Image (cartoon, rainbow, N blue to C red):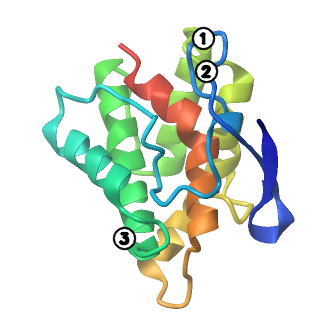
Amino acid sequence: ESGTGTGIAGDVSVVSTRPNSRGHDTARNRSPDRQTLIPQSFKLDIGSVPKINKIYHELKKLSAKDMPHSCAVMLRVFIELSVEEYLKRKAIGSSDRLRDNLLSATQRLMDDGTCSAKEVEATRLYASGDSLFSIRSLQQFVHNAHFSPTPEYLKTFWDNIEPFIRGLWKK
């Protein structure tokens, strides 16, 4: 039931829908044909932080095809707020730079065994800013009038960062 889809710059992403041994959806678990940025099967409990919870539920409804700019901007906001909330809950100092906060959160998730190095590798790469799939790209979608996302890019970005997001909100 797994297949591959080609993303931006020819990157190949694995797709399909079955939890791994930790109960997490794996990259194989998502349909490349889904309409929304976040798969409907993905569940988080963010009830204690109303604004972030509302953004999460909005992202589960937004069509990546029909509203790629809204998805890109809101995904960037969702990631930043989720990381800041995680660092606050764990009493880890934060920075003014999302990149630094991503790296701090990623390291903590690995150190405490919440996520494996493979599960957060995409996040570490995104924080580096040197590839098309990066936090820098999300920032360009917000601040550069000549930089536009595609639905496929956004869904692949989510699929790769999903284990990190799940780790941030694990109780």
Residue 77 in the image: state x and y as whole percent. 35, 55
Q: Nearest to the eye among marks 2 and 3: give it.
A: 2
Label 1 – label 3 distance at C-alpha:
32 Å
**Residue closest to the eye, 81 or 20:** 20
Label 2 – label 3 distance at C-alpha:
29 Å
Q: In which quarter of the image is residue 148?
A: bottom right
Q: Name the residue under label 2.
A: 19
Q: Tell me the element at label 1.
A: loop
Dot 2 amino acid type: Pro
**Residue closest to the eye, 131 or 74:** 74
Q: Tell me the element at label 2.
A: loop
Dot 3 amino acid type: Ser
Q: Mark 1 points at which residue?
A: 22
Q: What quarter of the picture does the N terminus occupy?
A: top right
Q: Nearest to the eye among marks 2 and 1: give it.
A: 2
Residue 6 in the image: state x and y as whole percent. 80, 62
Residue 73 appears in the figure: yes
Q: Residue at the spot x=69%, y=39% of the render?
A: 16
Dot 1 amino acid type: Arg
Q: Mark 3 points at which residue?
A: 70
Residue 88 in the image: state x and y as whole percent. 29, 27
Q: Residue at the spot x=40%, y=74% of the render?
A: 67
Please determine whether, in this image, residue 152 is positioned above or below residue 89. below
User: Quick check: marks 2 and 3 in contact, CB under 8 Å?
Assistant: no
How busy is the neighbourhood of tag 1: few (under 14 within 10 Å), some, or many (20 plus)? Answer: few
Please determine whether, in this image, residue 101 is positioned above or below residue 110. below
Residue 66 in the image: state x and y as whole percent. 42, 76
